[in-house]
Structures are given as C-alpha cells and as structure tokens.
Amino acid sequence: MKGMMSISEFARISSVCRKTLIWYDNTELFKPTFTDSKGYRYYSYEQIYTISVIQMLLELGISHAQIKDYMKRNSPEAEKKMLLNQKVMIEKEIMKLEGIQDVISTRLDSLDEAETNSPGITLQHLSASPVFMSSCLNDIARTDISDEMWMTFYKTCESHGNSFGYPEGFLVSDESVRKRTFDKVSAIVSYVGDWKYANAEMPEGDYAVYHGTGNTDDTAAAYSKLKAFIARHKLAIAGKAWEKRLIDESGTEDKNKQRIRIAIAVT
C-alpha cells in the first residue's frame, strides 16, 4: 500500500521481529494502522516513534499492562510524568552500576598488585588514595572486633551509597604504632577506588611496604620483618600502618594463597 509498510518491512526497520508485532496486535498493545481483508498488516512511518517508545519502556521493566494503559491515555502531560519517573529510576540504577564498577576495578587493581609484587619488603612512595573507614574502634585487638562492629560498618557503607566487595583491611592504632607492637587497630578500612565513595584518605608519602601471604588475622611475623627492615635502612616510623587484603576468600579459601599488603609511613 502507498505510504504504508508491510509487517516485514516494519519489522526490519523497527528491529522488532514479525512474531512480536503480531503478538502486540493480538494483545492490543500496538496495532497496525491498517489490516486488509486478507489479514495483511500495514504500518505507517509515524508508528516507528510509537514502537520505539514501547520497546524502551519494556526494556525499563514496565509491564505490558502498564504500557497498554499508558498508550490508551497518552498525552503530553502523561508522557512527561512517565518519562520523569523513568529518568529518576535510571539515574538510581546508573549510580548503582557505577558503584559496582568501582568495586570491580578496585579488586582488579588489588589482584594485579598481588601478581606483580613478589613477597618481601620495599620502600615505596605512594600517592594519596581514597578509603572509607569505620568509626574509631578505640584501639581494639583485631580478634576482638565483634560481629556487631562489622555490621555497623557495613550499614554505614550502605548509607553512604557504597557497594559491598571492596578490598578491606585495618588501620593500626596510634598507640600500637608508637609502641611498635602493631597489635591493635583503630578502624576497619575499605579501599575504594573513586573519591566520591571515600570519607578519608591514605596519605601520600614514603612507606615501608610488605607483601606476603595470609590475611589480617595474624600479622605478627609481617611486622617483625617490617621493623627489621626499617631499622636496617635507618628509617623512622612517621605515621600509621595500613593493612590491605589483596587476595581474600573471594579469590581463594586457601590462606596460603591469600595475599596481604602492609604499608607503614616512614621518613
């Protein structure tokens, strides 16, 4: 028909398959402009805009019934209201996906760090990096951190809009650093990737950096090696110690294959 497209032509241009268009017609979600006596369906070029909106709404998770109701009552005002609602939902989903992407990127960086650094201690200059820290734990032994403290930390992360799954560790307390015992911690640390997910920073500076196997449950041997390294190189401890799990249980349950980094600020 002149000025009309067959269902096959319309399917090709709209990228909606022929069977779907027939189903839309039968359910009265989207009908052709004209159906001849033989049952052949024909569509106008203007209907490309309508089917595009329908497909967009379906991809956003809106039900057929809701779309059908909207199409019956459509108006500029109704379209604006519907699109504004969807815009808000999409923005929330984008923020959620950006958070997940940041977790993935940060975990990949940690895995790369574990892979490229052999076990041992080196002197490194580290740039400032974003972290999200718990409230002060009042110089508590790491083994005494209760489930309630962990839950409080995770709820705080959630209220801040942070996704779960970042590499974690501890900030060693001022008292432990001063006494060089390194046995107490002052905060749980989540090593985020983007500054917008941070509430603190690991400062830029020179660090004695330990890479080794294991996790943060038992770090006595690591700190013994770090103290010997600092003394041997005639360095002075200038700040806190930052512990970070590079490979944790999500990578392997074998503790002999897990990896940790400990960085102590020095001068």
Image (cartoon, rainbow, N blue to C red):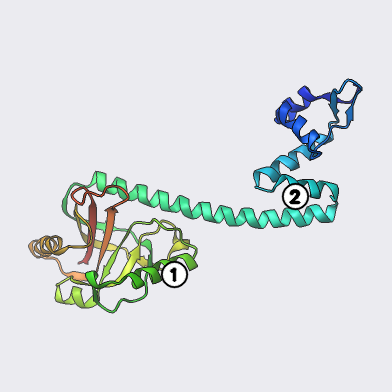
Left or right: residue 92 compared with residue 51:
left
In this rendering, the answer to whether 9 lies above or below 64 is above
Q: Which quadrant of the figure contains the C terminus? A: bottom left
Q: Which mark is residue 66?
A: 2
The residue sitting at 75% across, 47% down in the picture is 65
Q: Which residue is mark 1?
A: 156
**Residue type of the residue flagged with mark 1:** Thr
- In this rendered view, identify the residue nearer to me: 165 or 133: 165
The residue sitting at 9% across, 65% down in the picture is 231
Percent position of residue 240, x then y: 25, 70
Q: Which mark is residue 71?
A: none
Residue 239 visible? The answer is: no
Q: Earlier in the sequence, mark 1 or mark 2?
A: 2
Label 1 residue SS: helix
Callout 1 environment at 10 Å: few (<14), some (14 to 19), or many (20+)?
some
Label 2 residue SS: helix
Q: Which quadrant of the figure contains the N terminus? A: top right
**Residue type of the residue flagged with mark 2:** Gln
The residue sitting at 82% across, 46% down in the picture is 71
- In this rendered view, identify the residue nearer to me: 3 or 22: 22
In this rendering, the answer to whether 77 lies above or below 32 is below
Label 1, label 2: how many angstroms apart (C-alpha)?
A: 37 Å
Callout 2 environment at 10 Å: few (<14), some (14 to 19), or many (20+)?
few
Left or right: residue 122 compared with residue 60:
left
Percent position of residue 263, x then y: 23, 61
Quadrant in the rendering for residue 167: bottom left
